[in-house]
Image (cartoon, helix red, strand yellow):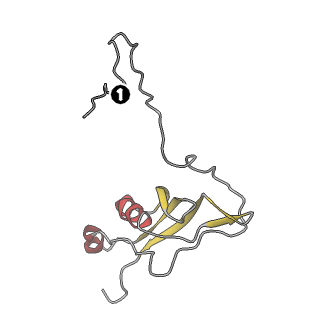
Amino acid sequence: MSTSAPIGEGDGTGGPVEIEQDVRIEEDGPPPDFVPVEKQPQPLPGNAPPPVYPEIARRAGVEGTVWVKIWVDKEGNPKKAQVLKSDAELFNQPAIDAAMRWKFTPAIMNNGPVSVWVSIPFKFKLNAGR
């Protein structure tokens, strides 16, 4: 049976350890507002759930539309969503939550997938037969 010294053993006089605070493991970061593409991302059928209608808005009879800007990555997954325009603030979070559950076909440029922003209107409309 042989023994060996532990790897990386030092004399304790090494310098301070510096930790990078800005290390990112995601892709290159959000794309610019405009990215030229040959084919826009499309919501996949069955993978674009509607937002949850807030009960307080339903009871008050409030309707509206929220335009959400969604960062769609190269795999067609939403990475970030933000409200561009909103008729009623109480719809903003349900619209963002729904947007982050959507799945898209990737945008295509030069025969390869690219990361882009897309704008989607989320309509909150009560049934006519309330």
| Identity of the residue drawn at 37% across and 63% down | 97
Q: Is residue 2 above or below residue 91?
A: above
Based on the displayed image, in which of its 4 quarters is residue 115 positioned? bottom right
| Identity of the residue drawn at 28% across and 31% down | 2
Location of mark 1 (residue) = 7
Q: Is residue 64 above or below residue 24?
A: below
Q: Please state, as top left, top right, bottom left or bottom right, where the N terminus lies in the image.
A: top left
Instruction: Give the structural element (helix, strand or loop) at label 1.
Output: loop
| Identity of the residue drawn at 39% across and 20% down | 17
- Which one is in front, 119 or 88? 119
Left or right: 4 in relation to 105: left
- Which one is in front, 110 or 53? 110
Q: Amino acid at mark 1?
A: Ile
Q: Is residue 10 above or below residue 129?
A: above
Q: Is residue 5 above or below residue 121?
A: above
Residue most extreme to the front: 1
- Which one is in front, 108 or 17? 17
Residue most extreme to the top: 13
Find residue 78 and report its horizontal and vertical position in percent: 48, 61
What crowding class fits label 1: few (fewer than 14 Cα within 10 Å), some (14-19), or many (20 or more)?
few
